[in-house]
Image: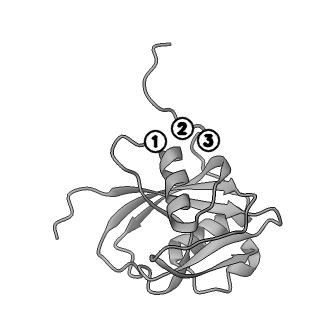
Amino acid sequence: PNIAYPEPTVGALIFDQQGRILLLKSKKHKNRYVIPGGHVEIGEKMHDAVRREVKEETGLNIYDVEILAVQDSIFNKFYHKRKHFIYIDFSCKTDSDDVKINEESEEFVWITPQESLSLPLDPYTERLIQEYLKGNKSKYRKKIIYGYKKL
């Protein structure tokens, strides 16, 4: 298939009340662990997209959603298709541990960010977690500006 443009996607580094993160073992990523996420739909705000994707893939509700990083994923060898994605990754919290994965994942794990680095991670998930552990949030503005307002 011809690729005309990169595809914008959102991902969620979800923290539970014990400070652990949720990772999914993904069939689409050659059984490596990834954060929940997916495509931004036409007309959908990124914050809404990440909430929807998390709900679809895990059954969880999230809050305190903040932009964490933006990454280019160009022809990731661990993804099942040749794609160019723009990952807009968020950090967020949940009060629930009642995870209900959908057909995209084989299993899930709650694990500390440090311990997660011993798992077979997708390289972009690994980089995101490493940057988080170093305290590196996005160098871009934390606020996402939607729409246009005359100042």
Q: Which residue is mark 3?
A: 142
Q: Please tell me the numbered disc located at residue 144.
A: 2
Residue ID at (51%, 45%): 48
- Residue 29, located in which quarter of the rendered image? bottom left
Q: Is residue 75 left or right of residue 123?
A: left
Which percent across, then down, holds residue 56? 50, 62
Q: Is residue 86 left or right of residue 13?
A: left
Q: Secondary structure at mark 2?
A: loop
Considering only vertical position in the picture, is 45 above or below 116? above
Q: Please tell me the numbered disc located at residue 45.
A: 1
Q: Dot 3: few (<14), some (14–19), or many (≥20) neighbours within 10 Å?
A: few
Q: Nearer the viewer, residue 63 or 76?
A: 63
Which percent across, then down, holds residue 24? 57, 76
For the N terminus, which image quadrant?
A: bottom left
Q: Earlier in the sequence, mark 1 or mark 3?
A: 1
Query: Which residue ends up furthest to the left in the rendered image?
Result: 2
Q: Earlier in the sequence, mark 1 or mark 2?
A: 1
Q: Please tell me the numbered disc located at residue 79.
A: none
Mark-to-mark CA distance, 1 and 3: 15 Å
Q: Secondary structure at mark 1?
A: loop
* Badge 2 amino acid: Ile
Q: Secondary structure at mark 3?
A: loop
Q: Is residue 116 left or right of residue 75?
A: right
* Badge 1 amino acid: Lys
Residue ID at (35%, 80%): 80
